């Protein structure tokens, strides 16, 4: 048993707050807000990966530099001050090359802060307080007011976390006398925690970028519950570590993550993932922070800092980056991911201490069940698209929607570029369409998001009050709806660049006189933005990010400046590709201009 359940005192409480602040900053800004700001700044996928790579490299370098120089409370405070400054500047430097500077400074600051806190924590508190701090950090990030903030708002919240952490860091540097056991050797800790971080990062990315998975796991109604689960289970982890459970805890964390990752793939079991995922994450996260100081076998700040530098470099930065990188094209968590992480956890448990074969055997059984319960592969995008195409035919979509942009006609300005006759005729059957009662769907994937398409299928008149299209909610009872969404989302997605170029050329003619902007807003915009334009419309919780607050901002896509009226008109007409903001291609120019004037009125 290690010293952990110490009485509450000012230093221990400050230590827990510091841990919570660093975790909160990392989660809400470095992992979440910064990526969204990059995308809103127009960064390509290559530039996004470059910026994140620079952040990771700087984080690794910062951690090893801190260990080499010798961590001190002053060093940690300075690092948190830099973190607060970079996240405050991020909304104003989301484009290159400013974003690269923010990435480098943020990574370096996090590297120093995480290594410093992990090495100094045994001088400040018992290990149970690490669990309390970890839980507080996760819980705060799941508060609806934080989780659903705009990317810029989350950046400023991240700055607030860093400032709180800077003020909370205690000054003590001498470790108290306590038992420091080598529960898991360095090689085992690196392998085990890398596998857990990798699985967590991959699962989080897949869930967060799929509207169905996200809404069933941590949608708006579940955020308070998730915050509570994170807090309670992290506190349990802290006291479990203090009671001698350090060897078993990572294995239990993997079991919980495995159940969550497999449950989220099925519509009927998705609700379980909302309970098991935050529980598993909280358990292993508390152990990750505590291992260098309490369970690596070292006794002193400097050797603990070196252990922390290696652990956060390999498990934290490398594991997280690879998990996200391998999940970017996936729509479900592959069972083989779950089994692979479990195999690593089993191997470490067996090889590091053969006496714990029973616990390893338990994990092995769960791993085998995970590997074979849902097959070894998740459905490929191509098979889902083909199934969706069959649904498109069987449901008679061809009777009301064309998939043919007429070359040399106004179609090209509204629906995107035309295809050659040879390409059109390759289809079996050809899906030109019988007539056009609804919009053309040739390039719909470049004009509408998955979330928008699903909402439209569930209840078309929530998005288009005058639509004659019936509800297709029944298709989502057995997966056909999601396949249809996938087919449409992939249709013409390559035309995105062409549509953006058309948007940049388009200029409305005339004025908004004769059109009622307020009525148009109520019909086309209020469902998402709300009647008052504050981003809380009845459909907002279905979307990947809350719609923009049209009265207070932040105005990422329509900041004040030159040609503001034209830029807003173009957003109304063509939407924002890559987001849930749709275009309103069929509106007359005078309607677009009336809407533009009404939207601008919210800012005054």
Image: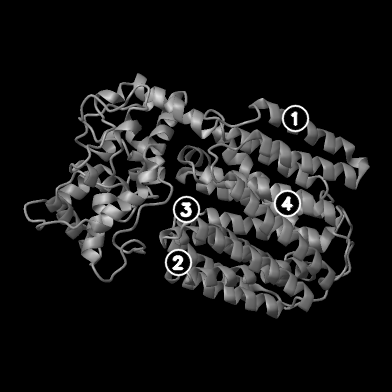
Q: Earlier in the sequence, mark 1 or mark 4?
A: 4
Q: Quadrant of the C terminus?
A: bottom left
Q: Which mark is residue 94?
A: 2
Disc 1 versus disc 4: distance between alpha carbons? 20 Å
Quarter location, residue 173: bottom right
Disc 3 versus disc 2: distance between alpha carbons? 24 Å
Q: Earlier in the sequence, mark 2 or mark 1?
A: 2
Q: Is residue 71 above or below residue 585?
A: below
Residue designated by label 3: 144
Of all residues shown, which one is farthest toward the left? 514
Disc 2 versus disc 4: distance between alpha carbons? 30 Å
Foreground: 601 or 200?
A: 200
Image coords of residue 350 (percent x, y): 88, 41
At mark 4, the secondary structure is helix
Q: Which mark is residue 194?
A: 4
At mark 2, the secondary structure is loop
Residue designated by label 1: 368
């Amino acid at each position: 048993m290690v010293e952990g359940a110490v009485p509450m005192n000012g230093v221990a409480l400050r230590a827990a707050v510091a841990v919570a602040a660093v975790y909160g900053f990392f989660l809400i800004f470095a992992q979440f807000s910064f990526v969204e700001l990059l995308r809103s700044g127009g960064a390509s996928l290559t530039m996004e990966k470059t910026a994140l790579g620079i952040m990771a490299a700087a984080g690794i370098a910062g951690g090893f530099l801190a260990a080499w120089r010798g961590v001190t409370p002053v060093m940690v405070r300075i690092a948190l001050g830099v973190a607060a400054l970079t996240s405050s500047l991020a909304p104003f430097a989301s484009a290159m090359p400013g974003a690269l500077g923010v990435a480098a400074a943020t990574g370096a600051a996090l590297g120093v802060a995480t290594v410093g806190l992990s090495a100094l924590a045994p001088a400040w508190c018992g290990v149970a307080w690490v669990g309390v701090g970890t839980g507080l950090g996760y819980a705060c990030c799941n508060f609806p007011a934080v989780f659903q903030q705009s990317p810029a708002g989350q950046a400023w919240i991240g700055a607030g976390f860093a400032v709180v952490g800077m003020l909370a860091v205690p000054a003590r540097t001498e470790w108290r006398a306590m038992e420091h056991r080598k529960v898991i050797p360095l090689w085992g800790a690196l392998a085990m925690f890398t596998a857990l971080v990798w699985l967590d990062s991959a699962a989080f990315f897949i869930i967060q970028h799929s509207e169905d998975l996200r809404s069933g796991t941590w949608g708006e109604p579940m955020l308070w519950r998730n915050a509570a689960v994170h807090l309670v289970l992290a506190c349990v982890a802290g006291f479990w570590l203090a009671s001698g459970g350090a060897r078993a805890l990572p294995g239990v964390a993997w079991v919980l993550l495995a159940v969550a990752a497999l449950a989220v793939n099925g519509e009927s079991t998705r609700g379980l993932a909302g309970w098991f995922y935050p529980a598993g994450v909280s358990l292993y996260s508390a152990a990750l922070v505590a291992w260098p100081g309490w369970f690596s076998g070292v006794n002193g700040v400097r050797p603990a800092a070196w252990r922390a530098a290696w652990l956060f470099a390999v498990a934290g930065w490398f594991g997280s980056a690879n998990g996200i990188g391998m999940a970017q094209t996936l729509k479900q968590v592959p069972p083989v991911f779950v089994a692979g992480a479990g195999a690593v956890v089993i191997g470490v448990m067996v090889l590091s201490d053969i006496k714990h074969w029973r616990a390893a055997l338990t994990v092995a059984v769960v791993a085998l069940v995970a590997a074979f319960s849902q097959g070894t592969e998740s459905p490929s995008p191509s098979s889902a698209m083909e199934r969706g195409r069959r649904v498109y035919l069987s449901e008679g979509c061809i009777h009301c929607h064309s998939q043919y942009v007429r070359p040399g006609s106004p179609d090209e300005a509204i629906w995107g570029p035309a295809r050659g006759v040879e390409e059109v005729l390759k289809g079996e059957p050809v899906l030109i369409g019988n007539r056009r009662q609804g919009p053309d769907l040739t390039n719909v994937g470049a004009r509408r998001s998955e979330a928008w398409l699903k909402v439209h299928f569930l209840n078309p008149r929530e998005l288009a009050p005058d639509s004659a299209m019936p509800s297709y909610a029944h298709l989502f009872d057995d997966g056909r709806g999601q396949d249809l969404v996938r087919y449409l989302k992939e249709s013409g997605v390559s035309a995105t660049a062409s549509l953006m170029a058309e948007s940049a050329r388009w200029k409305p003619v005339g004025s908004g006189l004769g059109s009622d902007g307020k009525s148009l807003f109520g019909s086309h915009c209020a469902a998402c933005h709300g009647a008052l334009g504050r981003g809380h419309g009845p459909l907002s919780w279905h979307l990947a990010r809350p719609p923009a607050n049209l009265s207070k901002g932040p105005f990422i896509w329509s900041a004040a400046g030159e040609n503001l009226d034209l830029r807003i008109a173009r957003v109304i007409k063509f939407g924002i590709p890559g987001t849930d903001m749709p275009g309103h291609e069929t509106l007359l120019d005078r309607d677009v201009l009336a809407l533009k004037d009404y939207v601008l009125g919210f800012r005054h």
